[in-house]
Amino acid sequence: MPAQADHTLSGMPVSAGHRRSIAIGAVTLGGVVSIVGMFGPWVRTGSASRSSFELADVVVRLGYARGGPVGLALRTWPLAPLSVVIAVVATWWIGGRVAAGIAVVVGLVVGLVGAAVWSAPDSILLGSRWGSLVSALGGATMVVGGAMSLFALKTPGRSGAAPTPARSLVPDAAPLEDLS
């Protein structure tokens, strides 16, 4: 019996190439969604809604981000969209474990920041808006896509084995002939 693909989708074998395509799509979709969320309204202050960049600027100017990793993250938040774009482009062009790792790390940072703002009590932020939730969901999608990309790389090798002949998925069908 010929070797089957190690993953199935609805009972049908899914090749490593298909898994990689799905992973690239997830990272790309997550990147687009997270960037849209970054520019959307994150909090309401008085009568104005503020984006993630305006919120980070206010926190830095008020002196709440003096040092440490939180201060560094707030001061470099304007580079977050560039980080997302780099992660998506690396996933498309480079692939591999490094690109998957970049997508996971960037997705985690964007997702956790968005989730933290979304889940903050209203007494602190006067109400979260849709931008923080959208960024959190986009970051989570990037993490899933990066993880899927890592798993797409782990395919069983068959060194020295002859290629598996094409088989019909229709029961009791005649064998498919080699058309090459």
Image: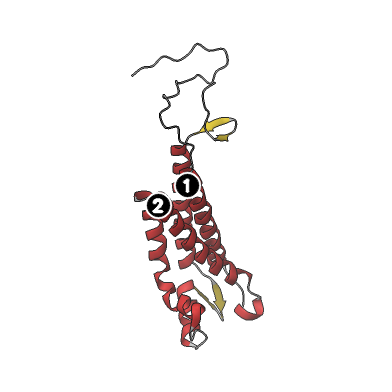
Q: In this picture, is 103 found above or below 127?
A: above
Q: Which badge, 2 or 1, comes first in the chain's sequence?
A: 1
Measured along the vertical axis of the image, is residue 75 above or below residue 103?
below
Q: Which mark is residue 91?
A: 2
| Kind of residue sitting beneath label 1 | Ala
Q: Is residue 126 left or right of residue 92?
A: right
Question: x, y percentage for residue 131?
Answer: 53, 66
Q: Say what secondary structure mark 1 lies in.
A: helix
In percent of width and height, residue 107 lies at 49, 60
Could you tell me which quadrant the C terminus lies in? top left
Residue 84 location, x and y as percent? 42, 61
| Residue holding disc 1 | 23
- Tell me the number on the disc at residue 148: none
Q: Position of residue 163 (x, y in %)?
A: 42, 25
Image quarter of residue 103: bottom left
Viewer-proximal residue among 176 and 126: 176
- Asked whether the beta carbons under mark 2 and mark 1 sit within 8 Å of each other, the answer is yes
Whole-angstrom CA distance, mark 2 to mark 1, is: 9 Å
